[in-house]
Image (spheres, rainbow, N blue to C red):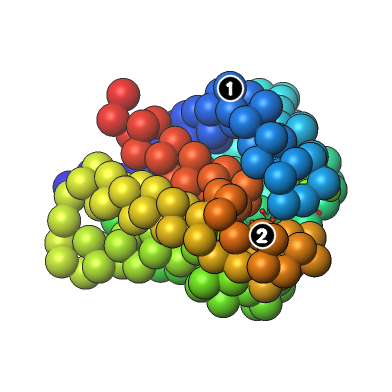
Amino acid sequence: DGRLTVDDLTAWMLRFDERIAAEAEHLTELDSAIGDADHGTNIARGTGAVRRRLADAPPGDAGALLKSSGMALVSTVGGASGSLYGTLFLEMAKSVGPAPELDTAVLADAFRAGVAGVVARGRAEPGDKTMVDALQPAAEALSVAAAGGRPLLESLRAAAAAAAVGRDATIPLVARKGRASYLGERSADHLDPGATSAAILVQALADARSE
Ligand code: ADP
Ligand code: MG
Ligand code: MG
């Protein structure tokens, strides 16, 4: 089965930063269609700050790592996505506490708690065309896999696949939260930028683990 160590979680954050840096232009392009053309730069600033913070002050346990990452995101991203991604990590940190390693079930519970925090803060339901459309199915897939006793990597891959499906399902939706909602019906037929970065986040964990 397997467990996520602090090194694995660090690798997740580094992979997230790498993928976001590579996709920043695309994410900003998506946001230019239905928002204010800053999602890529916002999130890349945040993941870069996470990378530097983890290098300068390597955390000693899983909770500390998630907390430090969340604080770096909140304090540097700005925009709606900054406080939402920050909340995701800070709630995950609270859920795991000072654990040295996370097994699949503990990770699944933490991710659910993180997504619940995003929903509580942003008040977006699945179907509102936001990052929740990728995060919520990922959390569900991870919980189902964990409850079924699936191995860690298989569970992470299931979560990443569910996030990608949720991301793609945002295309026809009309946005009901965030800046894109100002466009009303004109927000349809576009991929949501935040759902796209959220799918990258989940895929990054599966990728970091499979190396
Ligand atoms: P801003 O809209 O402030 O410029 P970003 O461009 O960085 O912030 O992020 C936009 C993304 O944030 C959207 O694509 C959407 O996925 C997400 N988002 C916006 N508002 C909410 C909300 N209330 N709940 C969940 N996600 C949201
Ligand atoms: Mg924006
Ligand atoms: Mg903005």
The tag earlier along the polypeptide, 2 or 1, is: 1
**x then y, percent, for residue 99:** 46, 54
Instruction: Calculate the distance from the C-alpha at mark 2 to the C-alpha at mark 1.
Output: 25 Å
Tell me which corner region of the image, top left, top right, bottom left or bottom right, holds residue 150: bottom left
Tell me which corner region of the image, top left, top right, bottom left or bottom right, holds residue 116: bottom right
Amino acid type, residue under disc 1 in the picture: Ala
**x then y, percent, for residue 59:** 61, 38
Q: Viewed as shown, does residue 152 lie left or right of 114?
A: left
Name of the residue lying farthest toward the front: 186
**Which image quarter is the C terminus in?**
top left
Q: Residue at x 79, y 39 (%)?
A: 38
Amino acid type, residue under disc 2 in the picture: Ser
- Classify mark 2: helix, strand or loop: helix
Q: Residue at x 56, y 49 (%)?
A: 191
The residue identified by callout 2 is: 187
The residue identified by callout 1 is: 22
Q: Is residue 48 above or below residue 152?
A: above
Can see residue 48? yes
Q: Badges 2 and 1: C-beta atoms under 8 Å apart?
A: no
Can see residue 57? no
Q: Is residue 200 above or below residue 107?
A: above
Q: Viewed as shown, does residue 181 lie left or right of 168?
A: right
